[in-house]
């Protein structure tokens, strides 16, 4: 799944099911073992009839006779297999996807014309899979979607394993395509449907089902659906315990993913346990570089637990291996420098932190061949977080702008770009550039809506931040709309007692007060105080602030509606304004940056 870099497929996994040009980004490589049949060479099994491309009696040098009318020639039942074979040969020979696209289009038309009424054509489904893969290799993902939506309607899984495989492949390929478009929710829906078909064909405990479960769990981690991801990952571990040797590479991959989920949920001790077991499995299988990657993750957990000496030891172990195996200027080395910089910053050793940041930036400025833009962007984002916390927002903004430029042309990175824009908005807000902050938030919100993340807790937090920027620009009506939407999302995703939700309640009450809706403001503050008194306790300093604000509003509500106008600077009281910039932060693991909790 794009974006999940901490969990890797074992290096000895077979190649993808669909052959694509080298520049293809549409089909995420996935092991053939995830398909219902043991060794499919394509998204569909080959039939024993002569209609199969591999057994066609025609060769590329001897095409079947064509009519003078090209449309009529498509009625020839031998033409579809021939054209499909030409499309595949064209791709494998490197002649370019444009010519292969023409062959695949004509092949699918021929299969459609020659299909028997009432009988699903697996050849048609296969040609549509290949056609969509070519569209994706050309970067035309939107055009691939309707092709795959058509393809998944062709097979009937109840007819047997061939049809089940075709349906499974279609749903998974469609999920990959949605993922490349940044539409994570739709992607997960397709993966879930593919998993359902696979389970019906193979049963709950087949090892191929385990691989698909892990694939889906990775997608759910990206969407921050951690509870669902944990459930699937546990299921995967159980399947691999039955079918794999102890300390297998499959189990190690499962445990690394489980550690990522536990870390995201704040269960650091469980995450550490899974990582140690994964490291032992990697050592047993001679995977030194992977052991170093696990050591880096272990260091992150020790850092979260404030066990700094142990974190330094783990980081240094990983650094030694990466330097010897990858070279001094490899991005893996830079990633360790970044983690050490973060550690020394948190322990107050700012000179050492700055030194490691500079070393990492030197590597990212002159990347070695083969370094991806995503790797550099991720490192720049982490370094910018350090600059932000030491009070250098201008330098942090420059690094985020560099990261965004590296990702803007990459498919499937819209959610990450939206996260960068949201974080830039927070920084711009903190230095008083409210219009620029609002614009940055607005762009990020638009991307998150397009990606289907309009119901996530992160989206609610960004809406709240954008509302605060609108307040500073005297756009109270717009701020109220944003706070109301944020409230509905955070109530659903986090619950009414969460600090982010309470912050939105407070902000919404302030905007209602500014609009003259005093009764609505009073109602919200009374509800917040009741929550604090009954569930959260009154020791929180926010309780006294909100109590004072409510008392003032109640006093004003008793007047003859001749209340004195307030300036916007006083609508959200000074202590509340400080809370919007407080140091308490929340880490959003799927996107790799921090957003201030409101």
Image (cartoon, rainbow, N blue to C red):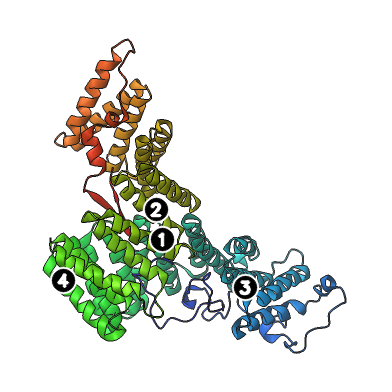
Residue ID at (36%, 35%): 471
Few, some or many residues within 10 Å of mark 4 (<14, 14–19, 20+):
many
Left or right of residue 139: residue 505:
left
Between disc 3 and disc 4, the foreground one is 4
Give the camera-side residue of 400 and 53: 400
Task: State the CA–CA distance, disc 3 to disc 4.
Answer: 49 Å
Few, some or many residues within 10 Å of mark 1 (<14, 14–19, 20+):
many
Between disc 1 and disc 3, the foreground one is 1
Q: Looking at the rendering, in which quadrant would you find the C terminus? A: top left
**Which numbered disc covers residue 312?**
4
Q: Which residue is labeled 2 in the image?
A: 421
Q: Earlier in the sequence, mark 4 or mark 1?
A: 4
Q: Residue furthest top?
A: 560
Task: State the CA–CA distance, disc 1 to disc 3.
Answer: 32 Å
Tag 1–tag 3 contact (CB < 8 Å): no
Task: State the CA–CA distance, disc 2 to disc 4.
Answer: 32 Å
Tag 4–tag 1 contact (CB < 8 Å): no
> Can I make out residue 279 in this image?
yes
Task: State the CA–CA distance, disc 2 to disc 1.
Answer: 8 Å
Q: Which residue is labeled 1 in the image?
A: 404
Q: Earlier in the sequence, mark 3 or mark 2?
A: 3
Tag 2–tag 1 contact (CB < 8 Å): yes
Between disc 3 and disc 2, the foreground one is 2
Q: Earlier in the sequence, mark 3 or mark 4?
A: 3
Query: Tag 3, which secondary structure?
Result: helix
Q: Earlier in the sequence, mark 2 or mark 1?
A: 1
Q: Which residue is labeled 3 in the image?
A: 130
Question: Which quadrant of the structure image shows residue 133?
Answer: bottom right
Q: Looking at the rendering, in which quadrant would you find the N terminus? A: bottom left
Query: Tag 2, which secondary structure?
Result: helix
């Amino acid at each position: 799944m794009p974006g999940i870099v901490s969990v890797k497929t074992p290096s000895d996994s077979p190649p993808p099911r669909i052959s694509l040009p080298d520049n293809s980004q549409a089909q995420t490589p996935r092991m053939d073992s995830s398909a219902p049949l043991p060794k499919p060479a394509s998204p569909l099994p080959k039939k024993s009839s002569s209609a199969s491309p591999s057994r066609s009696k025609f060769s590329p040098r001897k095409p079947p006779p064509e009519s003078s009318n090209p449309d009529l020639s498509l009625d020839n039942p031998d033409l579809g297999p021939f054209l499909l074979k030409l499309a595949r040969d064209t791709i494998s020979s490197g002649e370019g996807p444009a010519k292969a696209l023409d062959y695949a289009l004509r092949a699918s038309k021929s299969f459609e014309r020659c299909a028997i009424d009432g009988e699903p054509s697996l050849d048609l489904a296969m040609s549509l899979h290949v056609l969509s893969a070519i569209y994706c290799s050309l970067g035309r993902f939107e055009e691939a979607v309707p092709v795959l939506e058509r393809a998944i309607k062709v097979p009937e899984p109840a007819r047997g394993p061939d049809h089940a495989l075709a349906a499974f492949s279609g749903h998974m390929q469609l999920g990959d395509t949605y993922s490349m478009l940044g539409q994570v929710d739709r992607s997960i829906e397709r993966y879930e449907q593919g998993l359902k078909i696979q389970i019906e064909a193979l049963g709950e405990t087949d090892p191929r089902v385990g691989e698909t479960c892990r694939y889906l769990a990775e997608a759910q981690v990206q969407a921050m659906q951690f509870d669902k991801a944990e459930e699937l990952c546990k299921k995967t571990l159980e399947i691999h315990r039955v079918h794999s040797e102890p300390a297998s590479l499959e189990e190690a991959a499962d445990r690394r993913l489980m550690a990522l989920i536990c870390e995201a949920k704040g269960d650091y001790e469980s995450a550490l346990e899974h990582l140690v077991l994964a490291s032992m499995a990697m050592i047993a299988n001679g995977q030194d570089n992977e052991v170093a990657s696990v050591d880096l993750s272990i260091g992150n957990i020790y850092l979260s637990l404030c066990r700094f000496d142990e974190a330094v030891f783990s980081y240094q172990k990983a650094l030694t291996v990466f330097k010897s195996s990858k070279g001094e200027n490899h991005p893996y080395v830079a990633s360790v420098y970044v983690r050490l910089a973060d550690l020394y910053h948190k322990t107050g050793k700012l000179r050492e932190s700055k030194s490691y940041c500079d070393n990492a930036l030197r590597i990212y400025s002159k990347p070695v061949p083969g370094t991806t833009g995503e790797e550099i962007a991720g490192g720049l984002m982490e370094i910018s977080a350090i600059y932000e916390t030491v009070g250098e927002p201008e330098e942090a903004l420059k690094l985020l702008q560099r990261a965004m430029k590296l990702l803007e042309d990459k498919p499937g990175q819209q959610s990450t770009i939206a996260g960068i824009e949201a974080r830039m908005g927070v920084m711009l807000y903190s230095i008083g550039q409210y219009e620029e902050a609002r614009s940055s938030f607005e762009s990020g919100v638009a991307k998150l809506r397009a990606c289907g993340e309009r119901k996530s807790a992160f989206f609610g937090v960004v809406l709240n931040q954008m509302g605060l920027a609108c307040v500073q620009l005297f756009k109270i009506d717009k701020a109220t709309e944003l706070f109301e939407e944020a409230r509905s999302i955070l109530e659903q995703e986090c619950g009414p007692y969460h600090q982010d939700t309470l912050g939105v309640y407070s902000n919404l009450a302030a905007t209602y007060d500014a609009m003259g809706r005093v009764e609505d403001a009073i109602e919200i503050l009374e509800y917040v105080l009741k929550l604090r008194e009954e569930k959260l306790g009154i020791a929180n300093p926010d309780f006294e602030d909100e109590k004072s604000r409510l008392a003032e509003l109640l006093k004003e509500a008793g007047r003859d509606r001749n209340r004195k106008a307030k300036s916007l600077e006083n609508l959200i009281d000074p202590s509340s304004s400080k809370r919007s910039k407080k140091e308490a932060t929340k880490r959003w693991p799927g996107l790799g940056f921090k957003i201030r909790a409101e």
